[in-house]
Image (cartoon, grey):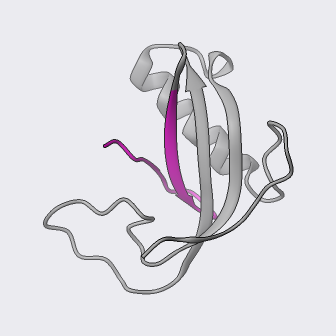
Amino acid sequence: MAPTSTPAAPGAEPPAGAEAVVRLAQEDLAQRLGLTPEAIRLVSAEAVEWPDTSLGCPRPGMMYAQVITPGFLVVLEAGGRTYEYHTDTGRFVVLCEE
């Protein structure tokens, strides 16, 4: 089941309430890539409602509460590559790798 989303305004500004999780995602990606957070560019961020607490990125063997979970879909860019993070509205960020 796909998340329902509310598109953000065009540009690289996060929607209201997303600033903290965007910063967490940038810090996480910077650490993974050995860069500074300032080297990570925000491509887009939009408010979404995930269908469960996996935030749209379930891990094999894990169980998740089946409740609508508000959060954000954050797309970052570093070194010419984009990275997709799924977040809740507070403190959890998940890099969704395929």
The part of the chain drawn in magenta is: 82-98
Q: Quadrant of residue 13?
A: top right
Image position of 30 with respect to 97: above or below? above
- Relative side of 50 to 63, left or right: right
Magenta stretch holds residue 8:
no
Question: Where is residue 80 drawn, in percent x and y?
Answer: 54, 16
Question: Where is residue 90 drawn, in percent x and y?
Answer: 62, 62
Image position of 15 with respect to 23: above or below? below
Image position of 50 with respect to 95: above or below? below
- Relative side of 50 to 5, left or right: left
Q: Quadrant of residue 49?
A: bottom right
The quarter of the rendered structure image containing the C terminus is top left
- Relative side of 34 to 15, left or right: left
Please name the residue shown 52% across and 13% down the image.
35
Question: Where is residue 48 drawn, in percent x and y?
Answer: 63, 67
The quarter of the rendered structure image containing the N terminus is bottom left
Please name the residue shown 16% across and 62% down the image.
60
